[in-house]
Image (spheres, rainbow, N blue to C red):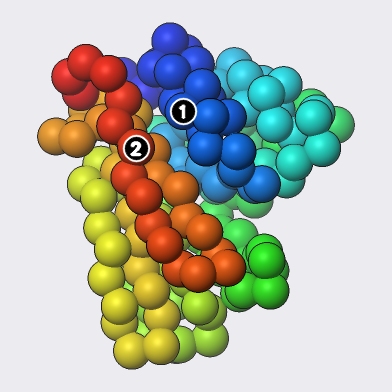
Amino acid sequence: PHGQRARTAQAIRLLQAADVQAVLHAGDVGDAEILAQLGAAFGLQGLPVHAVAGNVDGWDDAITRFPASEGVRMHVTSADLELGGQRVFMTHGHHHQLLEQAIAAGRHDYVIHGHTHVRRDEQVGLTRVINPGAVQRSPEPGVAVLDLADGRLTFLDLPGGG
């Protein structure tokens, strides 16, 4: 199942230790409490937190209508962001055509997606495509940290199996 609160707490600790300046959740939240955890740890501390809905989230109003006042900006299908002077597009990836169009368009420095639970770091034309993997149900459970200043991507492993 998605919505793994204990795994999310572990991921939050990894991201806090990495001193991230923004958090992106690429979907399959599974439980609005996950957004509340991210909001409390980052958004309400002044850091931007953006999330998109995944294929398991679209029917859940508690997720799709999560209040920004709780520290997370919920974008539902996709987010078109500017972070650190870079253009970033994020979608879950289950709308395959939307993902492929965003990659092919070359209008963004980065396209971030989830859905497959498999890590990805690929340059496609002008766009770098990144899937951070997933905190569970993944061959390599974890999160990813991208340094927008130098493009360095670091995958951080969660303890235990997926």
Q: Which mark is residue 68?
A: none
Q: Quick check: 24 left or right of 119?
A: right
User: Which residue sits at x=25%, y=50%?
Assistant: 119
Point out the tag, 2 or 1, that comes first from the N-terminus: 1
Residue 112: x %, y % from top left: 44, 60
Residue 75: x %, y % from top left: 64, 50
The residue to which callout 1 is attached is 14
At label 1, which amino acid type do we have? Leu
Is residue 114 among what the camera can see? no
For the C terminus, the image quarter is: top left
Depth check: give the residue in front, 76 or 48: 48
Secondary structure beneath label 1? helix
User: Which residue sits at x=58%, y=29%?
Assistant: 16
Instruction: Find out whether the residues at labels 2 and 1 contact each other: C-beta distance under 8 Å.
Output: yes
Q: Quick check: 20 left or right of 91?
A: right
Is residue 79 among what the camera can see? yes
The residue to which callout 2 is attached is 156
Q: Quick check: 135 left or right of 9?
A: left
Depth check: give the residue in front, 47 or 115: 47
For the N terminus, the image quarter is: top left
Residue 7: x %, y % from top left: 39, 17
